[in-house]
Amino acid sequence: MISQDDVAATAHPCDCQRQHAAPRLLAAAAIPPRYRSCTLQDFKPGGKAPLLEAQSVSQRYVDDYVGEDGRFREAGLLYIGPPGVGKTHLAVAVLKELIGRYGVRGLFVDFTSLIHQIQSTFDPGTPVTKHHVLKPVMEAEVLVLDELGSQKPTPWVNEILYLILNNRYTSRLTTFFTTNYRLPSDMAVAESLDRAPTVESIGLLSARIPANLVSRLYEMARPVVMDADDFRRDIKMHRHGI
Ligand SMILES: Nc1ncnc2c1ncn2[C@@H]1O[C@H](COP(=O)(O)OP(=O)(O)OP(=O)(O)O)[C@@H](O)[C@H]1O
Ligand SMILES: [Mg+2]
């Protein structure tokens, strides 16, 4: 259930404006080629309860993105799970729906690539500054921040992450996260699904990002625990007839 505090003060354009702007907005979102065709409909939960739940939470999120007062939701989703369970797939699918249906200015960013991009601005003679790289990430109306916690938490990496998260938090901008690390409270969710939690085997997000950012995360996004097997491995085994 989303509270009134979760809706952002963002006006939304009329249908014709949206349809006109969608292709341009989709291109500007910088979704990587592998994920460009991902949709909520082509996500196959394969009868697994956590994946069915993740798909339906994502669908409900998109359907309820505009509150009764006409404002967009503020809190996003935090997809948590081991590799290959479809976290990025669902995050991108939601982003595409929000762009297509509501005309939001969205952006996809993979945290590791972002860190490398910022590091490359330190090369002498590069006209691009750290600010150039970070500004769109800090200001996008809707952001997918893929692979949260993927980088070794050095003070410099933590500072970059703080700039992004704190700016988005204070500006009440919607962010979707994916991560291979769990929140301490995840286990209760996994246990309630009445199955052996594979998510137990993944590390804690609090060991990868500073406590002040973990705290903001609880307000910025609702956790969606995707406790399942690696889809990439399953597909490969099927293709190889294993
Ligand atoms: N349930 C699913 N139905 C359809 N396609 C899926 C499903 N799960 C994953 N895929 C596909 O499998 C590939 C891997 O999924 P994805 O990259 O979203 O996993 P991930 O959980 O983000 O993994 P990682 O933690 O390694 O980033 C993608 O091509 C994605 O479209
Ligand atoms: Mg991913």
Image (tube, helix red, strand yellow):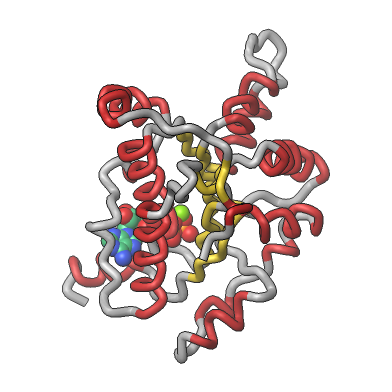
**Which quadrant: the C terminus?**
bottom left
**Closer to us: 128 or 30:** 30
**What is the x, y in percent for residue 100?**
31, 37
**In the image, what residue occupies the spot 50% across and 70% down?**
225
**What is the x, y in percent for residue 180?**
56, 62
**In the image, what residue occupies the spot 45% across and 89% down?**
195
Left or right of 145 on screen, residue 219 = right
117 shown above or below 150 = above
Left or right of 202 on screen, residue 85 = left
**What is the x, y in percent for residue 178?**
52, 55
89 shown above or below 72 = below
**In the image, what residue occupies the spot 33% across and 44% down?**
97
Q: Residue furthest front?
A: 69
Q: Quadrant of residue 101?
A: top left
Q: Quadrant of residue 239?
A: bottom left
**Closer to us: 129 or 4:** 4
Instruction: State whether residue 232 appears in this view.
Output: no
**What is the x, y in percent for residue 112?**
58, 42
28 shown above or below 63 = above
**In the image, what residue occupies the spot 46% across and 34% down?**
106
